[in-house]
Image: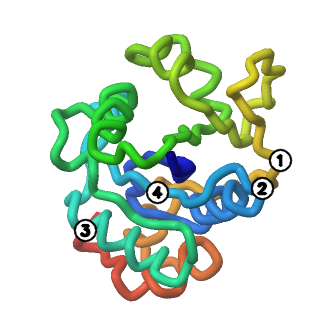
């Protein structure tokens, strides 16, 4: 039997995607923790039920444009066909069925790890999937006593989609915050 393709899943609303997201994705690949990484654009995060999102296909288009020249990093619309909200446990189950040739690995921030015990079906996730935890502003990386959880050693990236949307609305520059390839696609009308 052939080796499974290690595929990291880094989910988010990516409203919009920014250089912090891409730096984390690159750090996961550079640490050789996965063979490829899918940026899973979610139509509805259960932790952000009241967040007004731009159109799913627009956020996917931005994510695809941002990753078009990044080897091993792909934008995914897999959750678009799943029930909302997008519970990670359900997504992972569906991915296993759709892609039996892969071992899926979950990538989450220290902020999500801090509340992981509150996630829907978190025990299933921790039992069945490796998890990579990356640093987040305001959250110290925890001590991990589990063999399937890895702390990612990478710099903090203090960039937020909220700040980017504010800058778009006020007409402020976006250079250095988002990939240059997506700047022409970020318009006030979309946010």
Spatial CA distance of label 2 from label 4 is 16 Å
Residue wearing tag 3: 58
Residue wearing tag 1: 153
The residue mark sitting in front, 3 or 2, is 2
* Mark 1 or mark 3, earlier in chain: 3
Residue wearing tag 4: 38
Whether tag 1 and tag 2 are in contact, CB under 8 A, the answer is: yes
> Image quarter for residue 48?
top left
Residue wearing tag 2: 31
The residue mark sitting in front, 1 or 3, is 1
The residue mark sitting in front, 1 or 2, is 2
Spatial CA distance of label 4 from label 3 is 17 Å
* Mark 4 or mark 3, earlier in chain: 4
128 vs 175: above or below: above
Numbered disc 3: secondary structure: helix
* Mark 3 or mark 2, earlier in chain: 2
């Amino acid at each position: 039997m052939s080796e499974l393709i290690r595929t990291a899943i880094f989910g988010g609303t990516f409203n919009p995607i920014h250089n912090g997201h891409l730096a984390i994705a690159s750090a996961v690949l550079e640490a050789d923790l996965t063979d490829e990484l899918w940026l899973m654009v979610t139509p509805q995060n259960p932790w952000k039920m009241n967040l007004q999102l731009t159109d799913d296909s627009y956020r996917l288009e931005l994510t695809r444009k941002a990753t078009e020249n990044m080897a091993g990093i792909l934008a995914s619309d897999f959750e678009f066909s799943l029930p909302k909200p997008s519970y990670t446990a359900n997504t992972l189950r569906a991915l296993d069925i759709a892609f039996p040739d892969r071992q899926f690995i979950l990538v989450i921030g220290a902020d999500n790890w801090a509340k992981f015990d509150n996630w829907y079906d978190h025990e299933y996730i921790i039992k069945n999937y490796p998890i990579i935890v990356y640093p987040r502003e305001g959250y110290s990386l925890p001590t991990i006593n589990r063999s399937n959880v890895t702390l990612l050693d990478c710099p903090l990236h203090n960039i937020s989609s909220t700040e980017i949307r504010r800058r778009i609305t006020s007409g402020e520059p976006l250079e250095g915050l988002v990939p240059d390839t997506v700047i022409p696609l970020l318009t006030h009308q979309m946010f």
